[in-house]
Image: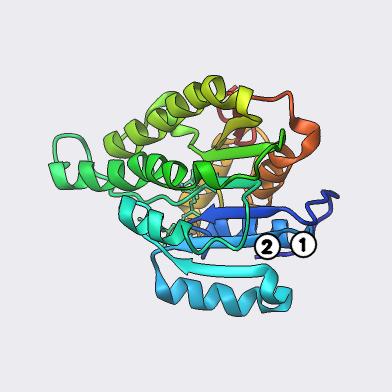
Amino acid sequence: MSTKNNVTFQFEGQNVLITGGAQGIGLQIAGSFLAAGSQVTVWDYSEQALSVASQELAKFGNRFCATQANVAELDSCLKAAQRLPGPLDVLVNNAGIVRDKSFAKMSAEEFGAVIGTNLTGVFNVTKSVLDRFREGSSCKRIINISSVVALYGNFGQTNYVAAKAGVIGMTKTWGRELARKGFTVNAIAPGFTRTQMVQTMPKEVLDKMANQVPVGRLGETQDIATAVLFLASQEAGYINGTILSVDGGLVC
Ligand SMILES: NC(=O)c1ccc[n+]([C@@H]2O[C@H](COP(=O)([O-])OP(=O)(O)OC[C@H]3O[C@@H](n4cnc5c(N)ncnc54)[C@H](O)[C@@H]3O)[C@@H](O)[C@H]2O)c1
C-alpha cells in the first residue's frame, strides 16, 4: 500500500467512510484520501486486518479511525454510524467477498453469503449513513465498487456477478433519487487488480490474466484509488449514475 499520491486532489476538512478498508483496494483508497488531507473512517469486520491497517496508517494520527463493523448486518452498521467522527462527505462501498463455484455446485448458503455482503451490505451501509451526510452540502459523494465481471458475467461467479450487477442497478437508481439532495452516486468496475488474494496465484495464471488486458498488465490498487478520488472530487460533480471501468480496456 502506497500513500504517495502523484495526482493532486485536495480533501482537507472532508470526512470519508470506506467499507472493507482494512486491506487491499479499500486500504489503498483510505491511504490516498489520508494523503489528500481527509479524515478517514474505515469499517471492516476483520479485527486483525484493522489492527494491521491502523499500524500502517499511524503516521496520519487521529485523522484515521478504524471501526469494527459487519456490512452484512444492518444493526452492526447502525451502531458503527453512531461513532462517525462528524458529518460525512464521501462514502465508498468497497467491502466484498468471493465464494466461487460453478452454478451446478454452488450452495444456497454460498449464494446468500455473497449477496448478503456485496449487495445487501451496500444497502445496509448506505441506509445507515444517508442522514449522516453534511447538511446543505451540494458535494455529497457515494462511490460503489462493482466489478468488471458485472458487465460480462464470469464462470464460477453466479453469486458475485449477481451482486455486483445489483450494485450497478442501485447506483443508477440512487443517482436519480439522490441527485436533488446534493449527491452524486457512481460505481467503479475494476478489472483484475493486484491485491493479496490475486498475488497468491501462480505466476503463469497472473501472466495469462495480464495478457488478456489490452494495456498488458494487471491493475494496481492505486489505479482504483485514483479513480475513486477523481469521482469524489468537486470537479467530478456533473458525473452521476455512471459506471467507470478501470480495467485496462478489458471491457471496451
Ligand atoms: N481485486 C480485484 O481484482 C477486484 C476486481 C474487481 C472488483 N473488486 C472489488 O473490490 C473490492 C475490494 O476487493 P479486494 O480485492 O481489495 O478484496 P480484499 O479481500 O483484499 O478486501 C476486502 C475487505 O473487505 C472486508 N470485508 C469483507 N466482508 C466484510 C463484511 N461483511 N463487513 C465488513 N468488512 C468486510 C475484508 O475484511 C477485507 O478487509 C471488493 O468489493 C471486490 O469485490 C476487486
Q: What is the tally of numbered marks visible in this picture?
A: 2
Q: Is 239 on the left-hand or right-hand side of 198?
A: right
Task: Say which residue appears at 43% left-offset and 47% top-offset.
Answer: 128
Q: What amino acid is at disc 2?
A: Gly
Farthest residue to the front: give it.
Answer: 135
Query: Are circles 2 and 1 on residues that touch, CB within 8 Å?
Result: yes
Vertical relation: 209 (above or below) 15:
above
Name the residue nearer the viewer: 2 or 239. Answer: 239
Farthest residue to the top: give it.
Answer: 176
Q: What amino acid is at disc 1?
A: Ala
**What is the quadrant of the C terminus in the image?**
top right
Task: Say which residue appears at 78% left-offset and 60% top-offset.
Answer: 37
Name the residue nearer the viewer: 15 or 122. Answer: 15
Mark 2 lies on a secondary structure that is helix
Name the residue nearer the viewer: 1 or 49. Answer: 49
Mark 1 lies on a secondary structure that is helix
**How far across and how far down the image is residue 163, in percent?**
35, 35
Would you name the residue on which mark 1 appears?
35
Residue 202 found in image quarter: bottom left
Would you name the residue on which mark 2 appears?
31
How is colour applied across the structure in the image?
A: rainbow
**How far across and how far down the image is residue 58, in percent?**
66, 78
Distance, label 2 to label 1, CA atoms, is 6 Å
> Which disc, if any, is residue 225?
none
Task: Say which residue appears at 72% left-offset and 62% top-offset.
Answer: 34
